[in-house]
Image: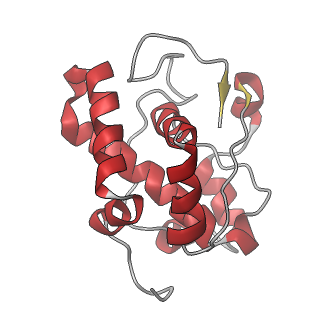
Amino acid sequence: MNSAQKISADDLKGLLGETLHTEVVQHFHDRSPEYGRDFVERQLTECLRYLYLVSRHQDRLSGLFLPVEQDIDEIWHYLILQTREYRAFCEERLPGGFLIEHRSVSYENYQREPGREQALGKRCGGSPSTARSSAPSTRARCRTGPSCDSSTSTWGSRSRKSRS
């Protein structure tokens, strides 16, 4: 895929693999059935878009803290725990060919960090709109990010003290 091509949700699903995709959707739907499978699939797609972006632009994004919504972070945690599949996904199917490591920060530090689009805009050589145009198509709507008055995720009522 060249840099001008857009990657679709179906492309990302194919990179992850049908079996793991189905497993992730089922797991998070079972935790919060009131949100429906479509919502879970959109959140999973946003997680995969994030990982694709980091992999594709390692030269620009390496070492940069890019905050994600808590729902997406929890999906990323789930994927990481599937160690064999996650490693193969990162190293063999994503464009960068390297394992994308996870790092959490405290909630307080998370609030002090620039927003995702602002950080991407600075790192990608322009404004937030430049960052958006270089990333695969749409973004998820924040349901529980730091700008909201909630410390719980969509997936359940437990609080999280650190975010990615």
| Residue drawn at (40%, 15%) of the image | 156
Q: Is residue 31 depicted above or below 72 in this figure?
A: above
Based on the displayed image, in which of its 4 quarters is residue 22 positioned? top left
Based on the displayed image, in which of its 4 quarters is residue 35 positioned? top left
Q: Is residue 65 left or right of residue 147?
A: right
User: Looking at the image, which is closer to me, 3 or 81?
Assistant: 81
Q: Is residue 59 visible?
A: yes
Which quarter of the rendered picture does the N terminus lie within? bottom left
Residue 113's spot in the image, x, y percent? 74, 40
Going by the picture, which residue comes out furthest to the front? Answer: 84
Q: How many marks?
A: 0
User: Looking at the image, which is closer to me, 107 or 45?
Assistant: 45
Based on the displayed image, in which of its 4 quarters is residue 88 positioned? bottom right
| Residue drawn at (50%, 52%) of the image | 85
Residue 39's spot in the image, x, y percent? 26, 38
Instruction: Describe the colour scheme in one phrase.
Output: secondary structure
Q: Is residue 95 left or right of residue 162?
A: left
Q: Is residue 136 left or right of residue 62?
A: left
Residue 25's spot in the image, x, y percent? 30, 39
Q: Is residue 140 visible?
A: no
User: Looking at the image, which is closer to me, 15 or 84?
Assistant: 84
User: Looking at the image, which is closer to me, 23 or 76?
Assistant: 23
Q: Is residue 146 depicted above or below 151 in this figure?
A: below
| Residue drawn at (40%, 30%) of the image | 143
Q: Is residue 48 depicted above or below 23 in this figure?
A: below
Which quarter of the rendered picture does the C terminus lie within? top right
